[in-house]
Image (cartoon, rainbow, N blue to C red):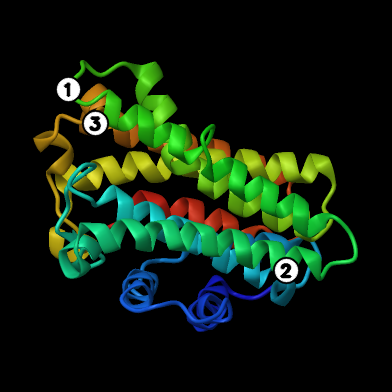
Amino acid sequence: MKAFDEYRRMTEQALIPTLSSLGDIPSPLWEAMSYSLEGGGKRIRPVLLLAACETAGGEAEQALPFACALEMIHTYSLIHDDLPAMDNDDLRRGQPTNHKVFGENVAILAGDGLLNAAAEVMAAAALKMEDLRGLRAMEIIMRHAGVTGMIAGQSEDVSSEGQEPREDIVRYIHEHKTADLLEAAVEAGLTLAGAEEAEIAAGREYAFHIGLAFQMTDDLLDVTGSADKLGKSTGKDLEQNKMTWVALRGVEGTAADARKEIELAQKALEGMPGDTAQFAAFADSLLGRAQ
């Protein structure tokens, strides 16, 4: 198993070649898609997918198209999240948001394009495999990204703006808008490696809890963080009266809840295969996030 930084480098090097392998994408659609895809970020989701695959005995190179596809899906969601009809953000990863550079119409199409490109990439990779692991991994990723997964969380997020915070709604938003794609990463990676069902379930539980912890700390950073370090605007949740964990539990309560989720994630690692030390270190790092 490689270091997490190596998986990140693998992803960075493969993203644009993977996108360009689909054929001749017209300008300015190509410029808009590649602008956001190359816009940096921590690449957490593809890193977790590749690491999960290799820790269970699989090959990172075979899993790489799925990791790139997952990052395309994540990037499309950010482009659409930033639109004026959604969060109306001007800054993402320290750069102007996609619609500020290319206009709303092209930004919408760039997001659509990345989502469809992800499906094409995974389907092509799955067709090259002798068994159904690739198809299963594709189904896992698309389900977690879809109308019962990430999009469901986004829908609840926008429809609950301005309401009094309720724990069941805040938890639903966090579980789906954030945790679902992290679950997709670990579950798909383990599936590609042929892991046992119990091992996949443990990986899914780990990712679920780090997803909740990640979003809780994200909510904290919107209140306490620096826009320069985050690479995006702060104070937006309060300004838009978003239903966040901080609105529900306050700063101290949110920090305490994040610590509990990380403890649960660490416990879940006992059921995952291979060397899980880097997964444990990643969970611990969430408490010290500055970006």
Give the CA distance from mark 3 to mark 2.
41 Å
Give the residue type that dot 3 points to.
Answer: Val
Give the residue type that dot 2 points to.
Answer: Ala
Sequence-first disc among 3 and 2? 2
Residue 263 visible in the displayed image: yes
Q: Residue at x 58, y 81 (%)?
A: 21
Q: Is residue 193 above or below residue 201?
A: below
Q: Which residue is mark 2?
A: 125
Disc 2, SS:
helix
Residue 273 visible in the displayed image: no
Give the residue type that dot 1 points to.
Answer: Gly
Task: Between residue 259 and residue 76, name the one nearer to us.
Answer: 76
Give the CA distance from mark 3 to mark 1.
14 Å
Task: Between residue 46 and residue 1, name the one nearer to us.
Answer: 46
Task: Between residue 121 and residue 169, name the one nearer to us.
Answer: 121
Sequence-first disc among 3 and 1? 1
Q: Quadrant of the N terminus?
A: bottom right
Q: Position of residue 248 (x, y in %)?
A: 26, 22
Q: Residue at x 34, y 55 (%)?
A: 78
Residue 144 lies in quadrant: top right
Q: Which residue is mark 3?
A: 246
Task: Between residue 161 and residue 112, name the one nearer to us.
Answer: 112
Per the rendering, the mark at residue 162 is: 1
Mark 3–mark 1 contact, CB under 8 Å? no
